[in-house]
Amino acid sequence: MKLLVCGGAGFIGSAFVRRQIQLHDDVEVVCLDKLTYAGNLDNLAPVAEDARYTFVEGDICDREVVEAAAAGVDAIVNFAAETHVDRSIAEPDAFIRTDVLGTHTLLEVVRERGIGRLVQVSTDEVYGSIDEGSFTEESQITPSSPYSASKAGGDLQVLAYHRTFGLPVMITRGSNTYGPYQYPEKLIPLFVTNALEGKKMPLYGDGMNVRDWLHVDDHCSGIEWVLGKGEPGEVYNVGGGNERTNREITSIILDELGLSEDSIEWVTDRPGHDRRYSLDTGKLRAQGWASEVDFEQGLRDTIRWYRDNETWWHKIKHGEGEFAQWQKRWYEDRA
């Protein structure tokens, strides 16, 4: 099988690319990535020299680039997206372009070229917040942020192209994902790397927002299952069944690093901050998929990975990129 993986230099996308090359001898991967601030070729260093891996720098909104990258592929897996809620509140334009217009471009190429399958990697955030129970694939989508609204827009296009044109497309909606190589603006890598540098952990509101946490390896195995066995036109929730408050996550990080609560800095809650996410993953589990990574062990292993791979994240946080400028813009006035 020859795959086009869009957004393959990002956190989950790069884990998926590494998994395909390292575990499957019969898979060839073309990785297409725009290399925005969150795209990082260092994430792909373990497979960079493999003859079955090809990297193409480009934007999924560019039809010509996508058509060239998709030549001869059997399937497309689309991770390409702007994904950070905070950034979508401050700078929403890029989210509409990539998450909506980019998805449209991919769908048109799939339709024109007759490509066998497309998996759209989405998020549980399209469902909005839920006080009790869990969202199923049939739940109404009620996004709260510009990010989740842009992802919902992409999802609706995917489903419409299946219903209108019969395209062989599937959607996965994953819960909060953690693990190595995650860009350090997200909660776990931000808190860990800040703590390792002797800086504060900026915890929103009362810290009691609940998320379902899923290790990146489990997330990729769920996407791989849908790619191989999913039914066209269907949505599949991929979750870990590990609901924790942000305060609980912070406590595990403090414990692993031997720090006190003095390392926490309480900051004003962000606008539209969903209180609780919860996914019902019964549909996928009933068909044989299961998450495997124990949450607390996976989190502690992840903390140690950042501790042991300072070179990787130090370049991001202190290099020539815009990480420091973003942190200053977003957090300085919120403390």
Image: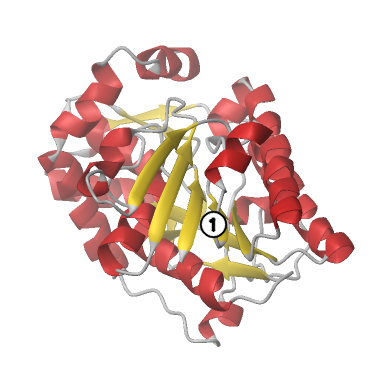
Instruction: Where is residue 140? Give x, y as percent.
Output: 79, 61
Asked whether 70 or 92 is in front, the reply is 70
Question: In the shown orientation, is residue 193 left or right of residue 125?
Answer: left
Q: Which residue is mark 1?
A: 73
Q: Where does residue 200 sit, x and y in percent of width and height?
A: 28, 26
Image position of 160 with respect to 66: above or below: below
Foreground residue among 177 and 109: 109
Q: Quadrant of the C terminus?
A: top left
Q: Name the spot of residue 50 as percent of width and height, x first.
A: 24, 51
Q: Is residue 285 above or below residue 171?
A: below
The outermost residue toward the front is 72
At horizontal 44% and vertical 36% (from top left) the residue drawn is 56
- Name the foreground residue: 160 vs 204: 160
- Which quarter of the picture shows residue 62? top right
Which quadrant of the view contains residue 95?
Answer: top right
Helix, strand or loop for disc 1: loop
Left of 286 or right of it: where is 56?
Answer: left
Measuring 78% from the left and 60% from the top, which residue is drawn there? 159
Amino acid type, label 1 = Val
- The quarter holding residue 326 reads top left
Q: Residue placed at 70% from the left, 71% from the top?
A: 234
Above-or-below relation of 332 to 119:
above
Can residue 215 be seen from the camera position used here? no
For this view, does 316 lie left or right of residue 4?
A: left
